[in-house]
Image (tube, rainbow, N blue to C red):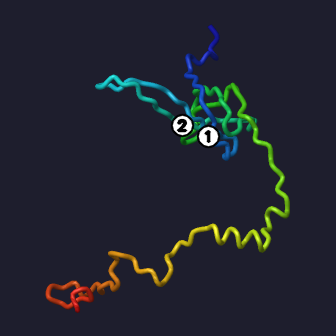
Amino acid sequence: MPSNVRGNRKERVGVVTSDKMDKTITVKVDWVTHHPVYKKLMRRATKFKAHDEKESASLGDTVKIRETRPLSKTKRWILIEIVKKAPSVPAVPVAEEATVPTEKARSKTAAAAPTAQPPSHVKRVGAPTVQPPSHAKRVGAPTAQTKE
């Protein structure tokens, strides 16, 4: 038996959730287990950091990863293969007119958008009109709410 055989290494299949790091991808692996007391099926997910030497995997791809020696503090898996590529979203060219709204379009959006603050003549019901100062909270001290 050759001496370079490393033994049985774990393999997982998951979806790439991040490819923003240099030569590293984050893979989310979903698995199902039984609750120890209630025996209900529970879905669980684990995120693994995996080494992607060629940076070939992209966001949404289904990949196969294999356990390996520690490559960094959190990276202990390597990318074996891309099982299924995610559908690529074509870039939509944006017309220059669409980015600069006209005066007519600005007035329509301003009229349609609700205002964040109520008009100044509308009084909110139940809201105190005057907040007492923090030092006036002593017992027997007059406050803005008790004055009449």
In this rendering, is residue 61 above or below 130? above
Question: The residue under label 2 is which amino acid type?
Answer: Lys
Instruction: Identify the residue under disc 2.
Output: 47
Percent of width and height locating residue 119:
50, 80
Residue at the top extreme of this rendering: 1
Question: Foreground: 124 or 132?
Answer: 124
Of the residues tagged 2 and 1, which is closer to the observer? 1
Residue at far left of view: 140
> Can you say whether 65 is above or below 7 in the image?
below
Assign a secondary structure to mark 1.
strand
The residue identified by callout 1 is 17
Front one among 148 and 80 = 148
Question: Image point 76% across, 41% down: which residue?
Answer: 89
Q: Are marks 2 and 1 in contact (CB under 8 Å)?
A: yes
- Decide if residue 78 is on the left or right side of residue 43: right
13 sits left or right of 35 in the view:
right
User: In the figure, residue 56 lies in which quadrant?
Assistant: top right
Question: In whole angstroms, how far apart are the C-alphas of marks 2 and 1?
Answer: 9 Å
Residue at 67% x, 26% y: name it: 80
The residue that appears at 46% across and 25% down in the rendered structure is: 32
Residue 132's place in the image compared with 41, above or below, is: below
At which x and y percent is residue 71?
A: 60, 37
Return the residue nearer the eye: 32 or 77. Answer: 32
Front residue of 72/143: it is 143
Q: Position of residue 1 (x, y in %)?
A: 62, 7
